[in-house]
Every structure is written in C-alpha cells, then in structure tokens.
Amino acid sequence: MLHRPDGLAAKRLLVIGGGKPDKFTSAEMRKAAAAAVRALKSKKLQRLAILLSEAHRSTEFAEAAVEGAILGTFEPDQHKTTDKDDARPVQSFAVCVPGGSEGLDAAVQRAQTVAESQNLARELANEPGNLLTPLRLAERARQMCTEAGLECEVLEQDRMRELGMGALLGVAQGSDAPPVLIIIRYRPDKAAEGAPNLALVGKGVTFDTGGISIKPSDGMEKMKYDMSGAAAVVGAMRAVARLKPPIPVTGVIPSVENMPGSRAQRPGDIVTSLSGKTVEVLNTDAEGRLILIDAITYAERLGCTHFIDAATLTGAIVVALGHVRVGAFSNDEDFLKRVLASADRQGEKMWPMPLDEDYREQLKSAFADIQNIGTRYGGAITAARFIKEFVSDGKPWVHLDIAGTAWLDDAKPWAPKGPTGVGVRTFVDIAMTWQ
Ligand code: BES
Ligand code: ZN
Ligand code: ZN
C-alpha cells in the first residue's frame, strides 16, 4: 500500500502483483480484484477504484474485475456472532474504463448477478449438516426461486417411492432426515422450435458419513460440503433467471443425508434404479453416483436433451488432479468442448478425463446389472463410467467431479478457506452462449 502517491488524486494506492503482463488474463484480473477487496477488510478503507490499463479496456476485464470484487467480499462466517472477518467491508467499488467501452453497463450488471450467485452457492456449501438437511436445502432453493421468479417443484419421499427411485431412496434410508428431489425450471419467453433443454444436475448429499461403510473420523467434518454440486446448481439457476439465456434450463437436485442408522443400506444390498437397472451396492460410501443416476433418468423423462452433472464424487479425482482442476468426463466430444470452452472463459480450471469402455469391466456384478464401485485404481473414472451406464445412448452428457475444487483447505489472497462455488460461472456461461 502506497500512501499519498505522487501525481494521483487517490490517497492510497494498493499494488497487487499480477504476474507476467502477457499472462494477465481476465481470470487474473478477477483474482486481483478479489485480493484487493480482501486486503482492505482489515483496514478502514471503504472505497476502492480500479483503473483498467490500455491493454485491458474491455467488457471482459471490467466484468472480471466486478466479479472479483464481489467474490472478495465473501466470508464463510454466517454463523459467527463475534470476530467476524468482514466487520468493515469495502462499501463501494468502481471500475474506471477511460474512453468507455461498448456494453459496459450490461457487463457490470451481469458480473454482479453471477458473482452474487456464486456467493450464494458458497454460503449454501458452507452450511453444516445439522442446519442444512435435504428439506432445508429444498426450502432454500424455493426461497431463491420465489425471489428470482422461477418454477420450483420438490418431490418428497412418497412420490419417489411411487416412481421407483430405488437407488436414491436406498442411500436416504439410513437417515431420519427425509430425501428430496428438487426441480427448478427456467423457460425463455420464446424458445426456438426444437431448442435444446439443458439439465444441470447437482449432487446434494447434505452430509456424507459414508453410511455403514463409514468414513474415518479424521476430517469427516468436511463432508458437509458434499452438496457443493447442488449449491452450484442453485446458484447458477439464480443467475439464469436474471440473465435470461435463449434456451430452457432445468436444475435437478437429488438430496439425501448419508447416515449409518439402523435402517441403513447394507453392503451387498441390491436396489432397482428409476431406469429399471439393478445395482449391487458394495460400498455405501459410493452414494453420490446412486442418487445422481435416478436424478438423470428423471431429467431425461422431463424432456431434457443435454446433461451436465456437478458432484463432489470421489477422493480419487483429488489424487489425479489435486485441488487445481475439475475432472470433466463425457460421452460426447462436441458437448465436452463446449463445456471446457465456457470453463476456460470463466477461469474455472477443468481437465478432460478418459472414459474408455475398458473401465466398464471393473463394474461387473455377480448378482445385479452393475455394482457401484470398481477397484482401487482409476476410481474417478469408474465412478463416471457408472453414471454413464444410466445416460441414454446419444444423449450428450458431461460429468464434473468437483471433489478437489469445491473447497479450499487454505486461504488464498483472493479467497478464504472454505467453499469456492466452483461450477456456477461455467454453468451460466454455457447457457448464455448457447446458439
Ligand atoms: N463424498 C465422497 C467423495 C469425496 C472425497 C468428496 C473427498 C470430497 C473429498 C464420496 O461420496 C465418496 O465417499 N467416495 C468414495 C468412493 C469409494 C467408496 C469408491 C471415495 O472417493 O473414497
Ligand atoms: Zn461417500
Ligand atoms: Zn459423497
């Protein structure tokens, strides 16, 4: 921080390292703006302005700066009553673009909507399991839909029994908290004839103990974020409602609590999924895939044509890609490209993962159509391959394993330790850029 810098009207100048000039992308701009807001929290400074340099006078950079500033305000302190980290947050933020730029106002509006939606996803992901049960998540989704003007439908346990969602219900049965399937619909005013209908499916395990295949207690508290995929869908739908993309978008959220109660599913149990296929549940901790398959089948029945799921699905993706990139799996090259292009534009790092037929072998069950786990090796891929089994042939689908990227274990200059809200910006970009 430089005080009374020479030749500037501003009283203070905050300097943030942005790396090499030719590598300074809008993703770096977003992080720099977030870091600036975070750096000023401990000071008494309440007004901040960023002046875009000549090379960056574009809506893309202005948008990223505004997003960064709003993302920088997020603190996972909704349950702190004292010592809140954002006691004196920045009150105003200006982006100065000398000479102006076409579409700047719209870009700033868009940025605000998207960043606030991403912060909503982060707030939800941070809620502990006792406070955010599947029913409470449904309430929060409903509340968002009322505010944003979206249709929201919540299928409860009885209805899911009638429909035959045996895979989802099997996971839920070990908990006293009843499961839900949340459906959020956005329809454009005039959708083109034969327009695609994009399904966004988010894993909503409000707490994952592992069930009878119980997890070690060390670090188990983190499993409150096992509904980060669901949170990303709620956040994205909020933004979609306001930004009005040209195609219909349907959010589908299967939500359960995975507990080892006395009626819990046992290893070896065989369940019948909504698709009719039977699954041998060899490990009750591989529950995400079980709830996702019934949600995807249901989304197909709703008439969705393209499917993206986001899920904190496997520890194996963390082994493969660390905490840097989201693993992206698909049955359709073109659709995967579209998703990766959106992710790239939005600075959400992803990486394409393989899905060869050879991996199917690991899922052969002696007693049912398929089993829910493979061997120790390639765990993120066999998980994805399991889900693919339930996506109808020819339906484009992308699976995003966000287990390594939905939560930051250590604070960064641009973000606190905690939920990242990954997925929201990519989801919104896909819908907005569809043609
Ligand atoms: N929710 C976990 C995956 C996870 C692990 C998310 C670490 C975030 C951080 C998932 O339900 C799970 O338990 N997966 C098992 C699968 C295994 C039993 C085949 C895993 O990854 O260990
Ligand atoms: Zn699990
Ligand atoms: Zn899980």
Image (tube, rainbow, N blue to C red):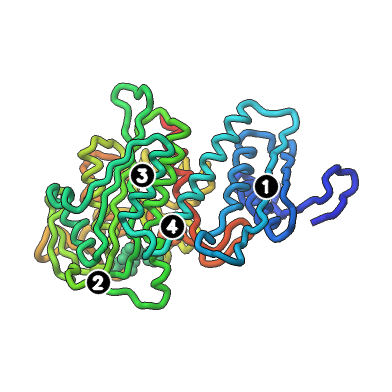
- Percent x, y of residue 173: 20, 63
Label 3 sits on residue = 142
Please provide percent x and percent y for residue 230: 37, 51
Residue situated in front as seen by the camera: 358 or 208: 208
Residue drawn at (89%, 43%), measured in percent from left and top? 7
Q: Is residue 129 above or below residue 430?
A: below
Label 3 neighbour load within 10 Å: few <14, some 14-19, many 20+: many
Which image quarter has ligand 2?
Answer: bottom left
Q: Is disc 4 placed on a helix, strand or loop?
A: helix
Q: Label 2 vs label 4: CA separation? A: 22 Å
Cα separation, mark 3 vs mark 2, equals 29 Å
Any atom of ligand 1 within 8 Å of the CB at mark 1?
no
> What kind of element bears circle 1?
loop
Name the element at disc 2: loop
Give how far apart the Cα atoms at labels 3 and 4 are.
16 Å
Instruction: State the image coordinates of residue 326 (x, y, percent, origin top left).
Output: 44, 55
Mark 4, residue position: 125
Q: Judge: label 2 CB < 8 Å from ligand 2.
A: no
**Residue 372 locus on image (x, y percent):** 22, 62
Q: Quadrant of the C terminus?
A: top left
Residue on which the image places disc 1: 91
Crowd tier of the residue under label 4, counting other residues whose Cα lies within 10 Å: few below 14, some 14–19, many 20 or above: many
Amino acid type of the residue that numbered disc 3 sits on in the rendered structure: Arg
Earlier sequence position, callout 1 versus callout 3: 1
Asked if residue 220 is positioned above or below residue 419 in the image, the reply reads below
Residue shown at the point (34%, 64%) measured from the top left: 207
- For label 2, the crowd category at 10 Å Cα-Cα, with few meaning under 14, some 14 to 19 and many 20 or more, is many
Disc 1/disc 3 C-alpha distance (Å): 30 Å
The residue under label 2 is 260
Determine whether label 1 and label 3 are within 8 Å by CB: no
Q: 356 or 90, which is in the foreground? A: 90
User: Comparing marks 1 and 2, which lies closer to the viewer?
Assistant: 1
